[in-house]
Image: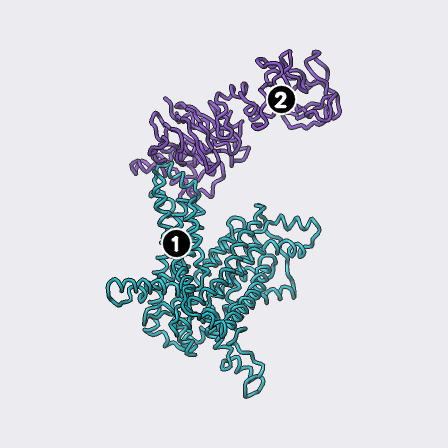
């Protein structure tokens, strides 16, 4: 008797999971149901370049984020030097800046017509171009931009791993004859390896998702190709085939992340925590540490934010009625998507709690969880295919010729739900871990039914998680570019779109106000994240899972 | 009146049998302790009786009313009027101590709730912490609040699942005493689950020893302790020496501590002899011939109120079992000393030898 409502909840969760999986299924189906040999043609012409660029980005960004992220995490969690407490949270600041915004700022600063080149010419006393001056609009420029905004993923997880390590294992290695640095190198770092792999995988998923930065720098990747094939040539099959190839890249990263997550369990053999031993750095060592932590913060946050600020002050007239209309559009999209994701993500989390042993539901929620890994451009193709198919069907039935679903905001909300539902689901799920099963049982024994337990126990205890989930989705939608670009209704622009369009027209200074607004909104969750870091004592909460939740979102 | 009847209840988790045809009854005002090793099904029995786990096989009646019967709709847990104390106490972190205590009083008129909750808190001595939040309380304080919360609605039956396992050993004895008094004063029936036999015997009017989903023996603490009906019960309730032998023609079993009578056993049957460690006496001189065996003291550990002594027969071969004795006070025996070991007949139990499978 009591199993029935549980089963209804499970079914509801499954239906939601299926809806989320639908666009991906559409991409796969379309790619294989292709009539022409488009991919064969691509393979002979541009495909090697896409694959090459994508591989270089994966390698470069992977190496860069690991070196910078692990190094910085190492310094702030295991060493003591002036400013360490500030660097601890300031290293997260670049999370607030979308890669495309950094790309626009860098293009304005560093390209041949920019102030840096001009200053260099003046200093050297040459009239023409400085011959060795590097071109920022290139593959390496894209790698630098992506690295300086994405290293916080690795930093955050590596730091959590270092803090979570039981001091006992470090101490036992000392008693077995290793020096402090030796024990850190031979025990500390290997123990953190799974977490570092997770952080790098998340960073690379974001790198593969990037559209704005590589597009602006003229680097052809799968995402820019999907956009071009879809938008300019209207070729759904080609876009789906490219999307499928990109999914294969992403699947590899997801596999790495999942496998590492299992291995991350070996960090938690011992449950005893004590403050980590700290190595006092002095003199040139301390200066080196400060320099190492300053560079990423400067490149990933201070420099682009300052450039945008100066350009915005230069163009106060940019805050016109049009700007506020775009801001309102962004707000409508972001808040709508936030409410949607929280309701559906919360419902799945609740269903999962009610029928923990339901395998189908668990599998369904795992599929929902994959959404965060799928690039926005791929989701856009899938959503357009699904809704286009629905419209054709509806028109065939009614004999009309209208865009029922694919022409409106519905398509955007659908795409945002697929991509950002995992954030909401994850946040609510991790909130639910604080509500132990015994609390539900205690509520039952004290005379409340499931509804009463939800109102009196779940809702008040989950309030914080739900707000966090809504905030994270809101910010992500504000920043989102490729899916919005591909699915938005005609004449419906947002701050992100307008920023992209100004930048595409090389009016970087006009792009600055919108970009700055996006950064300003994006900094809110980063502040929350750094406050959570400052508050959390190691060992009291599972820091790395909290970090994954937060970062997946940021 | 019988407060709780459990009738032939069986339960499985997948292929694992958690309860195997368990039947028992608890009278009003009585405290029954379910005791057994972890995984024996004692917590499952409590959860099934409370309705937190759906009943699979059998029947459950509370205060003369059938609340669950296999194949029929069962009364949901919130309607069973049972107070439940969880091992982790499960206090609601978003509510103050007073609000926690008032949580189950929503069926009362609003004006009555807080006075009732306060009264419950004062019964457990926590009225001064009414405005505190659970995370600021110590383990013992949390236990008291959880008890007050379970008691406030005045349930006819209390279930306590390992109520003292998270508590510091020093504090435990006092909490145990206080809890016993509160349960007795309430006049309700109580079922307490514990893995600690001492706790069970201290708290329970009756003790039910469980193993592998079955109730092996149920009775007063004294009866279960003095007259264990199976080797498992004898071993579970105290530290023992265990010997194997065969019943001889004279009706005794030969052990390392001498011959032990085995009344009612046919000659030639294999038997297991269990002798509690504090039933082994150690003396320097042979008291009466034939009542003790010559031994060598091979290890002595003083443990405060008693000493643990490892003995070996002077004629022992390599394969002979060691003999442990717990003697009160401090025994001035050096390792290697010669002594005589005897047995207290009250602490000796003879059972048919277990088949290797159930051993």
- Colour seen for chain A: cyan
Q: Chain of mark 1?
A: A
Q: Residue A51's x, y, as percent?
A: 51, 69
Labelled disc at residue A17: 1
- Which chain wears purple? B
The quarter holding residue B183 reads top left
Label 2 neighbourhood size at 10 Å, few (<14), some (14-19), many (20+)? many
In the depicted view, which residue is nearer to us: A317 or B280?
A: B280
Q: Position of residue B265 (x, y in %)?
A: 58, 14
Residue B153 visible here: yes
Along the horizontal axis of the image, is A13 left or right of A543?
Answer: left
Q: Are marks 1 and 2 in contact (CB under 8 Å)?
A: no
Residue at numbered disc 2: B278
- Estimate the spatial distance between the alpha carbons at disc 1 and disc 2, rounded to whole Å: 64 Å
> From this viewpoint, is residue A468 visible?
no
- Which of A514/A429 is in front? A429
Say which residue appears at 42% left-offset and 65% top-offset: A31
SS for callout 2:
helix
Vertical order, A504 against A466 (above or below): below
Q: Quadrant of the N terminus of chain A?
A: top left
Determine the secondary structure under disc 1: helix
Q: Determine whether, in the image, residue B355 is placed left or right of residue A459.
A: right
Q: Find the residue positioned furthest to the bottom.
A: A127
- The residue under the point 59% across, 64% down is A67
x and y percentages locating residue A45 in the rendered image: 49, 75
């Amino acid at each position: 008797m009591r199993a029935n409502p549980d089963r209804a909840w499970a079914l509801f969760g499954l239906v939601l999971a299926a809806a989320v999986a639908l666009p991906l299924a559409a991409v796969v189906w379309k790619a294989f149901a292709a009539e022409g040999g488009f991919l064969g043609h691509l393979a002979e012409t541009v495909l090697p370049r896409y694959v090459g660029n994508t591989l270089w980005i994966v390698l470069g960004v992977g190496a860069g984020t690991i070196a910078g992220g692990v190094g910085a995490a190492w310094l702030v969690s295991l060493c003591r030097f002036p400013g360490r407490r500030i660097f601890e949270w300031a290293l997260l600041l670049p999370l607030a800046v979308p890669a495309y915004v950094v790309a626009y700022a860098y293009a304005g600063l560093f390209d041949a017509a920019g102030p840096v080149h001009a200053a260099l010419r003046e200093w050297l006393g040459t009239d023409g171009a400085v011959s060795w001056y590097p071109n920022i609009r290139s593959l390496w420029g894209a790698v630098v931009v992506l690295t300086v905004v994405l290293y916080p993923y690795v930093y955050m997880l590596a730091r959590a791993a270092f803090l979570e390590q039981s001091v006992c294992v470090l101490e036992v290695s000392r008693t077995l004859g290793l020096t402090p640095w030796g024990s850190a190198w031979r025990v500390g770092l290997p123990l953190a390896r799974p977490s570092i792999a997770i952080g790098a995988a998340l960073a690379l998923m974001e790198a593969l998702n990037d559209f704005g930065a590589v597009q602006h720098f003229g680097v052809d990747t799968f995402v820019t190709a999907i956009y071009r094939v879809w938008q300019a040539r209207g070729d759904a099959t080609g876009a789906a085939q490219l999307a499928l190839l990109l999914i294969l890249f992403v699947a590899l990263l997801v596999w790495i992340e999942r496998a590492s997550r299992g291995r991350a369990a070996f960090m938690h053999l011992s449950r005893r925590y004590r403050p980590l031993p700290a190595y006092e750095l002095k003199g040139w060592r301390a200066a080196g540490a400060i320099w190492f932590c300053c560079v990423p913060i400067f490149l990933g946050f201070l420099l682009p934010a300052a450039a945008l600020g100066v350009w915005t002050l230069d163009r106060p007239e940019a805050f016109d009625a049009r700007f506020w209309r775009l801001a309102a559009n962004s707000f409508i999209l972001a808040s709508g998507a936030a409410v949607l994701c929280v309701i559906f993500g919360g419902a799945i989390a609740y269903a999962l709690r009610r029928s923990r042993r339901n395998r189908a539901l668990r599998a369904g929620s795992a599929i929902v969880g994959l959404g965060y890994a799928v690039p926005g451009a791929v989701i856009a193709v899938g959503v357009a295919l699904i809704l286009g198919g629905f419209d054709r069907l509806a028109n065939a039935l009614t004999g009309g010729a209208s865009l029922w679903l694919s022409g409106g905001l519905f398509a955007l909300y659908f795409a945002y739900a697929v991509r950002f539902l995992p954030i909401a689901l994850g946040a609510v799920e991790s909130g639910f871990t604080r509500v132990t099963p015994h609390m539900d049982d205690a509520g039952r024994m004290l005379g409340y039914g499931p509804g009463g337990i939800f109102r009196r126990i779940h809702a008040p205890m989950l309030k914080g998680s739900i707000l966090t989930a809504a905030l994270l989705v809101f910010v992500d939608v504000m920043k989102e570019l490729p899916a919005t670009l591909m699915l938005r209704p005609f004449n419906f622009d947002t701050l992100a779109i307008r920023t992209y369009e100004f930048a595409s027209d090389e009016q970087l200074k006009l792009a600055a106000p919108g970009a700055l607004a996006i950064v300003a909104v994006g900094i809110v969750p980063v502040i929350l994240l750094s406050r959570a870091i400052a508050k959390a004592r190691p060992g009291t909460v599972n820091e790395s899972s909290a970090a994954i939740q937060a970062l997946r979102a940021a | 009146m019988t407060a709780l009847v459990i009738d032939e209840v069986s339960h499985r988790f997948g292929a694992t049998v958690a309860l195997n045809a368990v039947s028992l009854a608890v009278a009003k005002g009585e405290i029954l302790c379910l005791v057994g090793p972890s995984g024996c099904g004692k917590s499952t029995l409590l959860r099934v009786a409370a309705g937190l786990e759906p009943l699979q096989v059998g029947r459950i009646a509370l205060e003369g009313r059938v609340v669950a019967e296999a194949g029929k709709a069962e009364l949901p847990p919130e309607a069973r009027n049972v107070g439940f104390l969880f091992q982790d106490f499960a206090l609601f972190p978003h509510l103050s101590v007073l609000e926690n205590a008032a949580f189950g009083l929503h069926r009362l008129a609003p004006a009555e709730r807080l006075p009732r909750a306060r009264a419950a808190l004062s019964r457990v001595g926590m009225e001064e912490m009414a405005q505190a939040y659970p995370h600021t309380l110590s383990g013992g304080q949390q236990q008291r609040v959880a008890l007050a919360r379970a008691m406030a609605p005045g349930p006819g039956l209390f279930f306590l699942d390992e109520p003292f396992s998270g508590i510091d050993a020093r504090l435990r004895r006092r909490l145990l005493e206080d809890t016993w008094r509160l349960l007795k004063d309430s006049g309700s029936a109580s079922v307490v689950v514990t893995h600690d036999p001492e706790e069970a015997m201290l708290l329970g009017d009756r003790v039910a020893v469980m193993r592998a989903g079955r109730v092996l023996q149920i009775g007063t603490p004294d009866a279960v302790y003095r007259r264990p009906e199976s080797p498992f019960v004898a071993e579970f309730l105290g530290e023992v020496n265990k010997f194997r032998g065969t019943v001889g023609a004279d009706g005794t079993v030969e052990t390392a501590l001498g011959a032990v009578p085995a009344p009612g056993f046919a000659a030639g049957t294999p038997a297991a002899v269990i002798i509690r460690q504090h039933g082994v006496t150690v003396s320097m001189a042979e008291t009466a011939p034939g009542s003790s065996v010559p031994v060598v003291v091979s290890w002595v550990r003083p443990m405060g109120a008693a000493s643990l002594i490892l003995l070996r027969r002077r004629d022992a071969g390599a394969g002979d079992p060691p003999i442990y004795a717990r003697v009160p006070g401090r025994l001035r025996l050096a390792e290697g000393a010669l002594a005589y070991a005897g047995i207290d007949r009250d602490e000796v139990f003879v059972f048919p030898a277990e088949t290797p499978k159930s051993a």
